[in-house]
Amino acid sequence: MSRVLLRSLVAVVLAAAAALVGWRVLGPAEVLSPASGGYPDPVSSGPGVTGRTNMAPLIVDERLRVYAGKRQVRADSPVDAKSVNTARWSLRRWPAQVAGVVASGPTVVSRWSDGELIAIDGRTGREAWRVGTDLPAPAAEGHRTGASIVWAPVGLYVGDGAVLVAGGGRLVAYEVASGAQRWAADVPCADGFTTLGGQFFCSSGGYSLSSGAALTPYPNGPFVPIACEVGRSGCAGLRDRNGQGYFADGRALRRSVDLDKPDSTIVAGKAVTVPANVQALGVSRGRLVTLTPDRHLRVDGGPDFPLAVGTEALTWKPGLWQVTDDFVAIERLDEDSADGYFTVDTVIIASVR
């Protein structure tokens, strides 16, 4: 009988040990590694290609590149580095996955599949605040590069000093500076965008970023955003369901017949027509940035150069991208490639100073 009890005791001890090891290996974990050095200065590279990366960087404050892996958000610098550098700071969580990343000034806000919303001070890599939301996060899926997570996150927006989180028919606004909830509203759509004038628009209508109140009367959606700063945040205008254009840089929309044209965009507060056969990418310091059919990056009144490193071919097509005051980053796609990407380091970064 004693041998049976001994064997049972040993089995219990071994099972407990295995459970402890399993918990340490597979249990929920989080590691935040802050920056060890000071905040880098902005770089001043001349116009031209500066580097390539295998992941899409969210360029923050013209000083950092922030990447979203499956379970990690990390930053490197300088922005004009030729390739991905050692991380300045990083946040790794398990088993949660990154669902979206946005930035407002130097503050980087990430949304996770477990509902956590975590703000990191990009200057130090330290946590600024966190909020546990009960809103269902979108599936953490996207491009291999993470481009859709950092350049076009679903249900995550910034504007008017707030970060907006959408899901489950709800829209909640939090203060970027503190994480304090500004307001919450029932909004039956998550396919929206924020405007420079302080509104949120989606297929069901418009809402004030300051209060969450529905804006009436307003044109009918669904809407098409025009000239957004990054992804679907900070848009300078929109078109309604009838294709009518409006400026959205003030507290009230302003009708513009010139923006009715599908090939029009907004530059420095004015409607402009995009030249034929080129693709508008965005605005840099009040200058229209376009991509030509032969894959040259063209800045109005400024540089014009091929987006290639060395002898790279110019046969790719653009995926997602980001335009800032000083830089452009573009994801390059290739239909003939097995994974759909032009090359391993498929994101090309260029200075437009």
Image: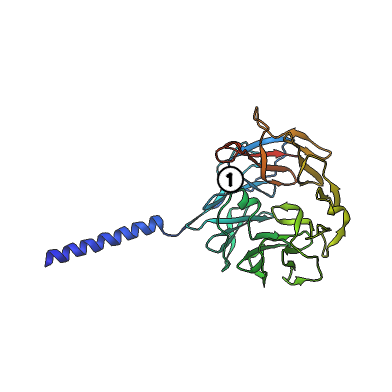
Q: Which SS class for mark 1?
A: loop
User: Does residue 296 show up?
Assistant: yes
Q: Is residue 39 left or right of residue 293?
A: left
- Quadrant of the frame with the C terminus: top right
Amino acid type, mark 1: Thr
- Give the color scheme: rainbow, by chain, secondary structure or one colour: rainbow
- Quadrant of the frame with the N terminus: bottom left
Placement of 203 over or under 352, stated as above or below: below
Residue on which the image places disc 1: 145
Give the number of marks. 1
Residue reaching furthest to the right = 257
Q: Is residue 108 left or right of residue 242?
A: left
User: Does residue 184 show up?
Assistant: no
Assess disc 1: are there few (<14), some (14-19) or many (≥20) residues with their C-alpha within 10 Å of its C-alpha. many
Residue at 57% across, 62% down: 137
Which image quadrant is residue 183 in?
A: bottom right
Which image quadrant is residue 237 in?
A: bottom right
Placement of 116 over or under 146, stated as above or below: below
Q: Is residue 168 left or right of residue 218?
A: left
Q: Is residue 149 left or right of residue 19?
A: right
